[in-house]
Image (cartoon, rainbow, N blue to C red):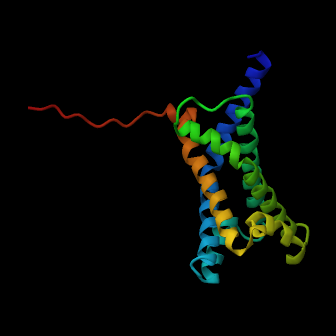
Amino acid sequence: MSTLKQRLTKISSQGHQLLVLLFALPLLISATTGIAHRLGRSWFGLSKDFGRAMMTLHEGRYLGEWGVPLYVLILGLGLLGIIATGLGLLWGRSLPAQWSARWLHHLLAAIAALPLLVSATTGMAYRLGRNWFGLSKEQAAIFLSLHQGTYWGEVGRPFYVLLVGLSLLTLVGTGLPMLAILRRLPQRRPRVTPQT
């Protein structure tokens, strides 16, 4: 491996790990509430109040009118950064030889990168378009439609949201244990009591 490639890999790795540490919890909340909203409304007929509660967490509506677009923008850019640095790490690598969490993480990252990229960019475009650029609901509807996978139809949309959300949850779940900083933390060992 060339020195330049080694440096770029190291920068990508450090950037990827830092971004995952910063954004893991908000991404977990966003993915979980996005899934709950869509499945709750589409499959279980839950109320609009339930949907609003999920969207409050999904978009950070508790941060107020000015906080929502900032939260969505920062979270979306964080996810884009994670995707970019993760793909940079995968470039030119093959899957690990045997099945493991790392194998699943690498395979799923390659498959889910495009849907996650679409979800992040269209979610940001919808929220920023509505809040900062004065787009009406009708004008911004294309972004929300792409974000939710509405083009898959009423039956397919919940499955799309479920697959994209579960992909993100699985990537975070398999990726966190691989973080170097977390592997360096002292492991809790069971206390051994001497026998008398």
Residue 191 appears in the figure: yes
> Which residue is at the far top?
2
- Residue depicted at x 62% and y 75%: 53
- Residue depicted at x 76% and y 48%: 80
Relative to 123, is 163 on the left or the right?
left
- Residue depicted at x 74% and y 72%: 153
> Which residue is at the far left?
196
Residue 25 in the image, given as x and y percentages of width and height: 59, 53
Closest to the observer, 193 or 86: 86
Give the position of the C terminus as an image quadrant: top left
Residue 132 in the image, given as x and y percentages of width and height: 87, 66
Closest to the observer, 116 or 135: 116
Closest to the observer, 7 or 113: 113
Give the position of the N terminus as an image quadrant: top right
Q: Quadrant location of residue 71?
A: bottom right
Q: Quadrant location of residue 49?
A: bottom right
Residue 67 appears in the figure: no
Q: Quadrant location of residue 191?
A: top left
- Residue depicted at x 85% and y 69%: 142
